[in-house]
Image: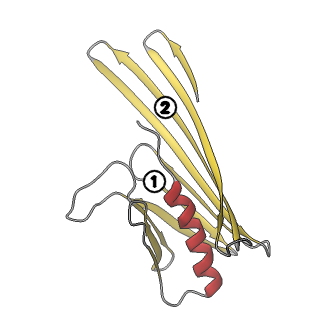
């Protein structure tokens, strides 16, 4: 994390990341990597302050075969939107902020991947369930599960 200040303005750059292994016990089926970058600016004007932030989360899972799935989400302190690349397909991924009962929360409580229709979804909070469309191939199911596992490990910084 780097912070720069000048007078009533400050700017902070935050970077974090982690690696993980998915499936297969001693011989993991996938190796995963997630990285996060956030830029935050703040200006104080006495009794009023203005804050802006922009974050990018990228996660990648790679199979021993070299096949990989890659996700990139970006947002400005609210809903994050991005793309998932798997093989020749590019899909849309969005963060979910609507809790059961209609409450809206600032941190993502899950993620949803959609193509022509819903493909997969995951909770980012306990118990951390993953939903996959029934007609997905086994390799697609494993790749989406690996990707979501990494995203569930993401703990956004305190804003």
Task: Give the mark, 2 or 1, whose residue is nearer the N terminus.
Answer: 2
Residue shown at 68%/76% (left/top)?
Answer: 24
Residue shown at 60%/54% (left/top)?
Answer: 58
Characterize the local packing of mark 2: few (<14), some (14-19) or many (20 or more) Cα atoms within 10 angstroms. Answer: some
Q: Is residue 90 left or right of residue 47?
A: right
Picture quadrant of residue 27: bottom right
Picture quadrant of residue 63: bottom right
Return the mark for residue 40.
2
Return the mark for residue 80.
1
> In this rendering, is residue 145 above or below 152?
below
Coloration mode: secondary structure
Q: Quadrant of the N terminus?
A: top right
> In this rendering, is residue 133 above or below 106?
below
Q: Position of residue 7 (x, y in %)?
A: 46, 9
- Secondary structure category for the residue under label 1: loop
> In this rendering, is residue 53 above or below 18?
above
- Secondary structure category for the residue under label 2: strand
Q: Quadrant of the C terminus?
A: top left
Q: Are marks 2 and 1 in contact (CB under 8 Å)?
A: no
Q: Position of residue 52 (x, y in %)?
A: 43, 33
Q: Is residue 39 left or right of residue 125?
A: right
> In this rendering, is residue 10 above or below 33?
above
Q: Position of residue 124 (x, y in %)?
A: 43, 60
Residue furthest out toward the right:
65
Separation of residues labelled 2 and 1 (CA atoms): 16 Å
Characterize the local packing of mark 1: few (<14), some (14-19) or many (20 or more) Cα atoms within 10 angstroms. Answer: many
Residue shown at 57%/73% (left/top)?
Answer: 144
Residue furthest out toward the left:
101
């Amino acid at each position: 994390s780097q912070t720069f200040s000048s007078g009533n303005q400050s700017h902070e750059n935050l970077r974090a990341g982690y690696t993980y292994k998915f499936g297969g016990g001693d011989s993991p089926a996938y190796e995963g990597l997630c990285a996060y970058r956030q830029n935050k600016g703040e200006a104080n004007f006495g009794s009023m302050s203005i804050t802006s932030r922009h974050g990018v989360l990228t996660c990648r899972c790679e199979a021993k075969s070299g096949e990989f799935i890659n996700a990139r989400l970006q947002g400005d302190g609210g809903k994050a939107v991005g793309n998932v690349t798997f093989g020749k397909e590019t899909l849309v991924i969005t963060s979910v902020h609507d809790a059961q009962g209609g409450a809206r929360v600032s941190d993502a409580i899950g993620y949803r991947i959609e193509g022509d229709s819903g493909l997969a979804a995951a909770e980012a909070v306990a118990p951390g369930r993953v939903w996959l469309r029934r007609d997905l191939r086994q390799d697609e199911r494993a790749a989406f599960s690996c990707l979501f596992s990494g995203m569930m490990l993401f703990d956004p910084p305190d804003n």
